[in-house]
């Protein structure tokens, strides 16, 4: 893995920790909380799993799963915000971090497909 890949993995881990810590403070909405914790932690887990992919296709697949989980996390984050469970500042900060991870995943997937 390159340094960029390691940074992406580290950012995904930090993002999942931030989501988990935030969810520890939120009362109610347990279904939404469980979903966002699962999807946000799956982003980094699939990035990590891609490191040991069995093939280029498997590598791309793991990153694509991570991208889907990232998108799902954005959905749950918006839902929790609209329910009034987090502030707009917190929402925008986490949405921006998730968006950054998503954009880098898209770039990595595109590069991997071009180098196939």
Image (spheres, grey):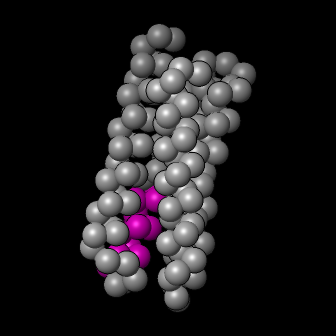
User: In the rendered view, would you say 15 is above or below 25?
Assistant: above
Q: Is 75 in the magenta?
A: yes
- The residue stretch that appears in magenta: 72-82
The residue nearer to you, when weighing 3 against 64, is 3
Q: Position of residue 71 (x, y in %)?
A: 42, 52
In this rendered view, identify the residue nearer to me: 33 or 115: 33
Looking at the picture, how far across and down is residue 44, in whole percent?
58, 45
Residue at point 54% right, 41% down?
10
Residue visible at 42% across and 43% down in the picture:
101
Can residue 17 be seen?
A: yes
Does the magenta-highlighted stretch encompass residue 97?
no
- Image quadrant holding the N terminus, namely top right
x and y percent of residue 45 in the render?
64, 45
In the displayed structure image, the side of residue 55 where residue 30 appears, left or right: left
**Residue at image coords 52%, 89%:** 28
Quarter residue 79 falls in: bottom left
């Amino acid at each position: 893995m390159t340094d960029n890949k390691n940074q992406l993995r580290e950012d995904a881990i930090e993002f999942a920790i931030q989501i988990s810590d935030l969810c520890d403070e939120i009362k109610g909405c347990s279904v939404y909380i469980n979903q966002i914790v699962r999807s946000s932690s799956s982003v980094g887990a699939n990035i990590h799993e891609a490191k040991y992919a069995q093939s280029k296709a498997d590598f791309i697949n793991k990153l694509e799963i991570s991208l889907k989980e990232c998108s799902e996390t954005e959905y749950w984050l918006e839902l929790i915000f609209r329910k009034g469970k987090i502030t707009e500042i917190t929402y925008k900060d986490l949405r921006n971090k998730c968006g950054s991870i998503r954009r880098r995943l898209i770039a990595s997937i595109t590069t991997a497909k071009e180098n196939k």
